[in-house]
Image (cartoon, rainbow, N blue to C red):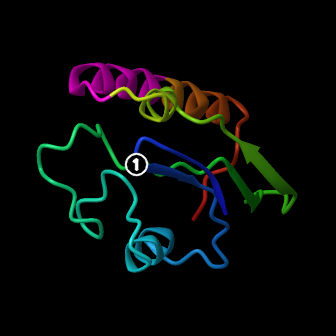
Amino acid sequence: MTLGHRSGLALIRARPLTGRTHQVRIHAARLGCPVLGDRIHGAAPIDAPWPHLMLHARQLTLLHPGTGERLTLDAPRPGCFEAVWQGERDPAELARLAVDDRRAALFFAGTMKSAQLPPVG
């Protein structure tokens, strides 16, 4: 589902039906609208300003490995996604925002660890 168009970009919501690796990336590329920053399926130029693959899981639903309880995890759109959507193309600024996004992801991972989920495997 296309949520919007701006500056030659499209913001798309995808709902994968399976957990197959690269499913969204492959389908998007085959439809002629590869994911920004996809250097494998999208043939992104090496000097593109995107700091990383611009693909984000807004929501994941899974079964808790210890209790079997169904969990739904939500994550806001990363700051660098918002910046690109608003027209930011400066590689240095996008890289700075990507670092901030990774810090947020590390904080989220730390939150999950503190929930004392049992190890998987």
Label 1 Cα neighbours within 10 Å, binned few <14 / some 14-19 / many ≥20: few
Q: Residue at x 32, y 19 (%)?
A: 96
Camera-side residue of 4 and 95: 4
| 86 left or right of 94 in image | right
Q: What x and y, as percent, mark residue 29? A: 38, 73
Q: Residue at x 29, y 29 (%)?
A: 89
Magenta stretch? Answer: 89-103
Amino acid type of disc 1?
A: Gly
Camera-side residue of 8 and 39: 8
User: For residue 107, which quarter of the picture?
Assistant: top right
Q: Residue at x 63, y 79 (%)?
A: 18
Residue underneath mark 1: 8
| 86 left or right of 2 in image | left
| 11 left or right of 114 in image | left
Quick check: is 91 in the magenta stretch?
Answer: yes
Where 24 sits versus 87, above or below?
Answer: below
Where 71 sits versus 100, above or below?
Answer: below
Camera-side residue of 76 and 27: 27
Quick check: is 42 in the magenta stretch?
Answer: no
- Secondary structure at badge 1 equals loop
Q: Residue at x 29, y 40 (%)?
A: 50
